[in-house]
Each structure stands twice: as structure tokens, then as C-alpha cells.
Image (cartoon, rainbow, N blue to C red):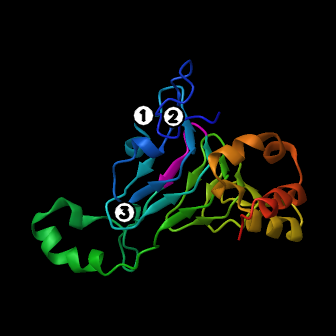
Amino acid sequence: MSPDPTAVHPIPAFQRVVFLRPLITAPTIEVGEYTYYDDPDGGDRFEQRNVLYGYGSERLVIGRYCAIAAGTRFLMAGAAHPSMGVSTYPFTIFGGRWAEQTLDIVTSMPSRGDTIVGNDVWFGYGSTVMPGVRIGDGAIIAAGAMVTADVPPYTIVGGNPARPIRQRFADEDVARLQRAAWWDWPADLVTEHARKIMAGTPAEIEAIATAAGLGH
């Protein structure tokens, strides 16, 4: 039996672990089923404490089956300051004449766009994702990494700024896994093949998807 994706605390004895999907209320944040956050201080306020500067219309989209360690932060486009002139000071936010004189500067700033995270992505402790980044399926973000650029599928990145360390599988195997898209399988099929998903080969995962008439 698979865990209930609507349960906030899927492991009752460990309240630090939360499924994020049932906790999200902001219309600009979308999280897939079974993606969890683990925080010793409690993960219930992920939306407020871990998604920062979400003042605009830009979206944060996180796929299914992602594992997010404590201290992971997603900086949204609202964190940007104008940098086309002499000063980066945000005069506008303080209102009054400052806002009257500068509002058009802020509203004309180009946006870095939505932040998109694929499925089955593992975020290490204290990692940070900058606005507008796209992270592919199966990627691993090392502890403390500062992700400033897109991350290809099934690639491990680390450092500040984060750089590729290695690709987890050969190109043909990455293609197999993306075709199989096990994260889109029905929950009972994932449960049936959880051992293979954890320890099997890309070819085995593709074979299961093909037999079930699934995949892309």
C-alpha cells in the first residue's frame, strides 16, 4: 500500500517530514504528489520560510517524488533589484515621492520567469535555487549548492555557483528514463515496482513502462 499523498505528515512518528502538496495555498506555487520536505523545526511553514520574495506573478513549479532537505530555499523574481543605473537601492518599496519617481523603473524590469523543478529531484541540505532556473528530472543538487543556471536531467551539481559534477547515466539511459516517466505511473504500479525504481536499471524501468502501456 502506498502512502496517502494528501497526508501532511506521512510518517506519524516523524513530524519533521511533510508532504508539501496539501500544505500549499499560494496560487503561484505548485507541488506534485509525494514530494516531501524534511526539517527538524517542522516543515509546515515551507511556503512562508522556504519560498522567498514571491511578490510577483512568477511561479514555482515542483514535480512529483522530489526530496527536499532542510534549509533548501527558492528565491523568486521579487528578490531582484534594478541594476541599470548607479544604485541598486530599492527606493520604490518605501512609498511616497520615492515610489512616485521610480515605480516605472521597477515595473519595466525584465522578469527571470518561472522556476521549474522536474520530478524525482533530490535537494541536499541548505541548497539555494535562484529565480527562473529550470532543473531537470532526476537531478541531484548537492548540499549547500547555489543553483544559478539550468540543470540538465539526471545531472549532479554542486558548489557556488553550482557546476555539473557528473551525469548520473549515459545519454541513452537518460532518454529511457524520461520516456518511462515512472513518476507519472499510477501509485499502485509505483508501489509494485518500488524496489526496481530504487535499485534497478533504466532499461528495466523502461520495460515496465512498456509492458504497462505507459511512458512517453
Question: What x and y, as percent, mark residue 58?
Answer: 39, 67
Tags 2 and 1 in contact by the CB under 8 Å rule? yes
Looking at numbered disc 3 in the image, what kind of residue is underneath it?
Gly
At x 21% / y 75%, what residue is drawn? Answer: 102
At x 84% / y 45%, what residue is drawn? Answer: 196
Point out the residue furthest to the front here: 212
Label 2, residues with CA under 10 Å away: few <14, some 14-19, many ≥20: many
Q: Which quarter of the image is occupied by the C terminus?
A: bottom right
Task: Report whether 207 appears left or right of 88.
Answer: right
Question: What x and y, as percent, mark residue 179?
Answer: 75, 68
Label 3, residues with CA under 10 Å away: few <14, some 14-19, many ≥20: some
Residue under numbered circle 3: 78
Tags 2 and 3 in contact by the CB under 8 Å rule? no
Task: Tell me which numbered mark, 2 or 3, is placed earlier along the sequence.
Answer: 2
Which secondary structure type mostly characterizes the magenta part of the structure? loop
Magenta region, residue range: 69-74
Residue under numbered circle 2: 18
Looking at numbered disc 2 in the image, what kind of residue is underneath it?
Val
Question: What x and y, as percent, mark residue 101?
Answer: 16, 77
Point out the residue furthest to the top here: 13
Question: What x and y, as percent, mark residue 119?
Answer: 64, 56
The vertical placement of 101 against 136, above or below, is below
At x 48% / y 26%, what residue is drawn? Answer: 41
* Mark 1 element type: loop
- Return the mark for residue 103: none
Label 1, residues with CA under 10 Å away: few <14, some 14-19, many ≥20: many
Marks 3/1: CA–CA distance: 23 Å
Give whichever of 160, 187 is nearer the camera.
187
Decide if residue 168 is in sight here. Answer: no
Residue under numbered circle 1: 44
Marks 2/1: CA–CA distance: 7 Å
Looking at numbered disc 1 in the image, what kind of residue is underneath it?
Asp
